[in-house]
Amino acid sequence: MLPLGTKAPEFDLIDTVTEQYVTLQTLKGEKGSVIMFICNHCPFVKHVNPEIVKVAAIYQEKGIGFIAISSNDVENYPMDAPNLMKENAIKEGYTFPYLYDETQVTAKDYDAACTPDFYLFNGNLELVYRGQLDDSRPGNGVPLTGKNLRDALDATLSGHEVDSEQKPSIGCNIKWK
C-alpha cells in the first residue's frame, strides 16, 4: 500500500467522457482529492457505484475533487474499453471524470491493487487515507454507507488527522497486461 503522507503521483490521462487529456493538477480539489480505481465489469464496483455517486455529490460541494481511473487490460477485458467507460459514467450519473490508464503506469504509481480502491489526498496532495469505502460487499447484507471514506473526508475537512487504522479495499484484482 502507498504509505500515508505520500504526495499524489502526477498523471496525464484521457477522460473517456470528454475525450480530453487531463492532469491531476487540473482535477484536484481545493480541500482534497479522492482518486478511485474502478472499472465497468467488477461486481464490487457495480455494488458500490450508487454510494460513490452520493458521496461525490456531497463532498464535491465542500471542495473535494473526485477522480475515477480504470487501468484494466481492455484486450482481455473488453467490457472495460474507453467507449464503454463513457457509457457507464453517463448511465451511473458520475459527476466526476472517468479516466483511462492505458499504459497502467498510473495504477502502478499509486500501488493500486484492486477495484474499487480509494485514495484520499489532503489539499496539499498528501495521502491521508487509502482503503475501503465501507464494510458492504456484494451479497453480505451490510448496507452501503460509505462510512470509512466519509469519516476520512470529514476528518480532512475539519483539519483533524485521519485515523491511521485503515481497512484495505476488497474487490477484483486490477487486470494487468
Image (cartoon, grey):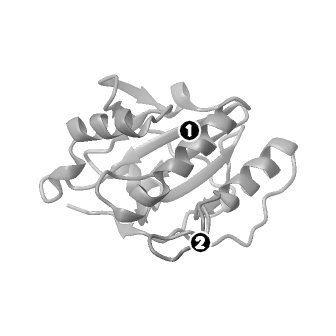
Residue 159 position, x and y percent, is 87, 45
Q: Quadrant of the C terminus?
A: bottom left
Q: Give the mark nearest the N terminus, 1 or 2.
A: 1
What quarter of the picture does the N terminus occupy? bottom right
Residue pushed farthest bottom? 140
Q: Amino acid at mark 1?
A: Phe
Q: Amino acid at mark 2?
A: Val
Q: Position of residue 161 (x, y in %)?
A: 83, 56
Other residues around mark 1 within 10 Å, as few (<14) / some (14–19) / many (≥20): many
Viewer-closest of 25 and 42: 42
Q: Secondary structure at mark 1?
A: strand
Q: Residue at x 78, y 58 (%)?
A: 162
Q: Viewed as shown, does residue 132 lie left or right of 114?
A: right
The residue tagged with tag 2: helix, strand or loop?
A: loop
Which numbered dot is residue 88?
Answer: none
Query: Where, by quadrant of the figure, is residue 139 drawn?
Result: bottom left
Taking the spot 56% from the left edge, 69% from the top edge, the residue there is 136
Q: Position of residue 70 (x, y in %)?
A: 35, 48
Measured along the vertical axis of the image, is residue 8 above or below residue 131?
Answer: above
Cα distance between the residues tagged 1 and 2: 25 Å
Seen in the picture, residue 171 relative to 162 is either above or below; the reply is below
Q: Which residue is mark 1?
A: 66
Q: Are marks 1 and 2 in contact (CB under 8 Å)?
A: no
Residue at the spot of label 2: 142
Residue 141 point in image, percent of width and height: 54, 74
- Give the quarter of the image for residue 86: top left
Q: How many marks?
A: 2
User: Residue at (29%, 24%) from the top-left corner?
Assistant: 19
Q: Residues within 10 Å of mark 2 (few under 14, many from 20)?
A: few
Q: Farthest residue toward the left?
A: 75
Q: In front: mark 1 or mark 2?
A: 2
Image side of residue 20 versus residue 141, left or right: left
